[in-house]
Amino acid sequence: MALMKAAVFVEKNRIVVEEKPIPDIGPLDALLRITTTTICGTDVHILRGEYPVAKGLIVGHEPVGVIEKLGAQVQGLHEGQRVIAGAITPSGHSNACLCGCSAQDGVGTAHGFKAIGGWKFGNIIDGCQAEYVRVPDAMVNLSPIPDQLSDEQVLMCPDIMSTGFSGAERGGVILGDTVAVFALGPIGLCAVAGARLLGASTIIGVDAVAERVSVARRMGADHIVDFTQGNVVEQIMALTAGRGVDVAIEALGTQATFEAALRVLRPGGTLSSLGVYSADLHIPLGPYAAGLGDYRIITSLCPGGKERMRRLMQVVASGRVDVSPLVTHRMRLDDIEAAYELFAHQRNGVMKVAITP
């Protein structure tokens, strides 16, 4: 039995590199040799035991690699091809896909809890912080990488770009909108870039980390609100002359940021929620206008599938968005424990860590 190295969830606060069998593939699958991957904030939730997965599961859901082997029924791809797959891997034929919501393909019960939509890698099947990964429904999910783009240039596409952009898309950002983005981590920064691409005229970023603020300005933020320097809601309302924002994008996943995002909306505005919450949320009566404010609260799960990936890579290739500043550290798979420690504690200005097997 051929073996590979992989980052495995052992127990709460323990993800370690172990040897695991190289995956077998079915007729519609592909075996991908991973060349680059990364750690996501959701992986940190898994590490801390805040999101349960099965012990022994290989974690990670942001694969860039080369096709090692194709299932017998896969067409339109070839072995040796450089590809990416989205963090969400829809089948293309489920009820959710046929209803136009492919990110929710696969909702069901696994390991005694409700799986989040179509998120399978590192959740209900083995993930890609490994030397190899099995990609289900390869024809739906594998998208060839343009020759002119490097692995690092497309590393944000499977999750971070797709999620951040969806915050602006699902929030309905249109020309001339004022948008506030709460938390300028990698997803929040991509939400800034997405809002700019969709035509927002004023983008307000909320954060206090100097490195993130600098990147946010490069990616399109017009104003920065430092949450350590006073009441965030008051500062945003002052910047909008009391009008409020058209769209507030919440990219952290806490009660405080969710509530602040609701409080800065104009009447009829939209709260676009991207955060992964680890506790119940409460909607305050006043800011919600007792349910009479014509507000919209929208949630998003990272859109996946090969066409989404193709479009995101085209945006990168066009030069309209530069996500290279998000990759701040580079480490080997053998050093995954140190990489998790760095990323989970947000040390040394880390935003994203490129992991190579």
Image: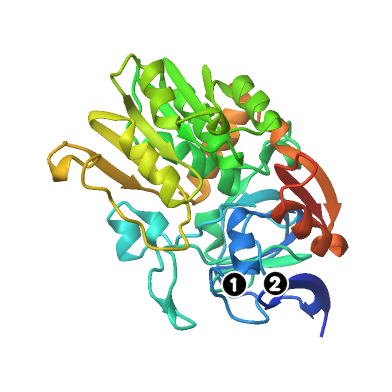
Residue 271 x/y as whole percent: 33, 39
* Quadrant (top left/top right/bottom left/bottom right) for the N terminus: bottom right
The residue located at (85%, 52%) in the rendering is: 331
The residue located at (63%, 54%) in the rendering is: 40
SS type, badge 2: loop
Q: Which quarter of the figure has residue 5? A: bottom right
The residue located at (44%, 43%) in the rendering is: 257
* Quadrant (top left/top right/bottom left/bottom right) for the C terminus: bottom right
Relative to 245, does residue 143 appear above or below in the rendering?
A: below
- Tell me whether the residue at label 1 lies in contact with that at label 2, contact meaning CB atoms closer than 8 angstroms: yes
Q: In this view, does 171 lie to the left or right of 210?
A: left
The residue lying furthest to the front in this view is 230
Nearer to us in this view, 147 or 322: 322
Residue 272 x/y as whole percent: 37, 41
Q: What kind of residue is marked 2? A: Asn
Q: Is residue 308 left or right of residue 57?
A: left
Of the numbered discs in the image, which one, if any, rests on residue 49?
1
Q: What kind of residue is marked 1? A: Gly
Location of mark 2 (residue) = 13
